[in-house]
Amino acid sequence: MAGVRQFDEGEMLAGALEVFWRKGMRATTMADLAEATGVQRGSLYNAYGGKEDIFLLAFDGYVARFLASAAEALAAPDPRDGLKALFAFTIASMTNGTPARGCLSTKTATEAALDDPRVRDRLRGMLDALHRIIAAALSAAPDRLAVTPGDHPCRVTPDQAADLVVTFTRGLAVMERVYQDSAHLQRIADALVGTLFRAP
């Protein structure tokens, strides 16, 4: 990165993140970023080189905060309660704003931004890290995990359950875009928790 920055990078990235979250990386322009951050386009180009580089920095900060909040939610003594807290946090994040802003990572994954291998690697890294956090939390009570079709429960490992949960969160993000109803999303999440865990 070249040039001396005459602006607060943290504030700039926070403003940029809101634009990327609302419009998506592909549709966002340097003019959009300049307007949202109050930093001239020339200064942004000199400091970062382009919108893709700004997106990666903003996304890295978002991922760090998201994973920290996910780990905090999952830290409950009972992993069932932890999973409920994770879904409550995830739903709140998706439905924040007017209109609701949706899920940044899922929006990014479903647009042409994935043509950039750096973006694809960042998304994979985020989902892999989320999987590890969930699997570690569910490992606290592996004997309680079970997928229960009818009267024939099938045991799943914490790692398998983490795969289900991560995949479920991506589907939940799509359901939010269609229904835009946080109560509906919570009912779906509660159904998955009830399916994954044996009764205490």
Image (cartoon, grey):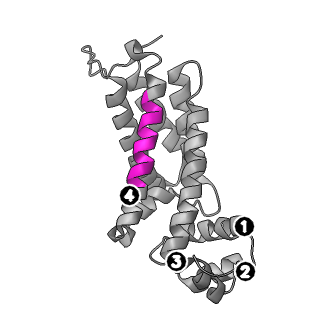
Q: Is residue 38 magenta?
A: no
Give amino acid for label 2: Gly
* Residue 23 at least partly seen: no
Position of residue 121 measured from the top left corner of the image (x, y, whole percent): 38, 58
Q: Residues within 10 Å of mark 1 (few under 14, many from 20)?
A: few
Mark 3 or 2 closer to N-term? 2
Mark 2 or 1 closer to N-term? 1
For label 1, the residue is 11
* Residue 15 at least partly seen: yes
Q: Report the Cα–Cα distance between label 3 and label 4.
A: 17 Å
Is residue 19 toward the left or the right of residue 178 in the image?
right
| Helix, strand or loop for the magenta stretch, by majority | helix
Mark 1 or 4 closer to N-term? 1
Mark 2 or 4 closer to N-term? 2
Mark 3 in CB contact with mark 4 (< 8 angstroms): no
Q: Which residues are magenta?
A: 123-135
Above or below, 63 relative to 142:
below
Mark 3 or 4 closer to N-term? 3
Front residue of this view, candidates 142 and 190: 142
Mark 2 in CB contact with mark 1 (< 8 angstroms): no
Residue drawn where x is 41% and y is 55% of the image = 123
Position of residue 147 measured from the top left corner of the image (x, y, whole percent): 31, 23
Give amino acid for label 3: Lys
For label 3, the residue is 51
Q: Residues within 10 Å of mark 4 (few under 14, many from 20)?
A: few
Q: Report the Cα–Cα distance between label 3 and label 2.
A: 15 Å
Q: Residues within 10 Å of mark 3 (few under 14, many from 20)?
A: many
Tag 2, which secondary structure? loop
For label 2, the residue is 38
Res. 121 mark: 4
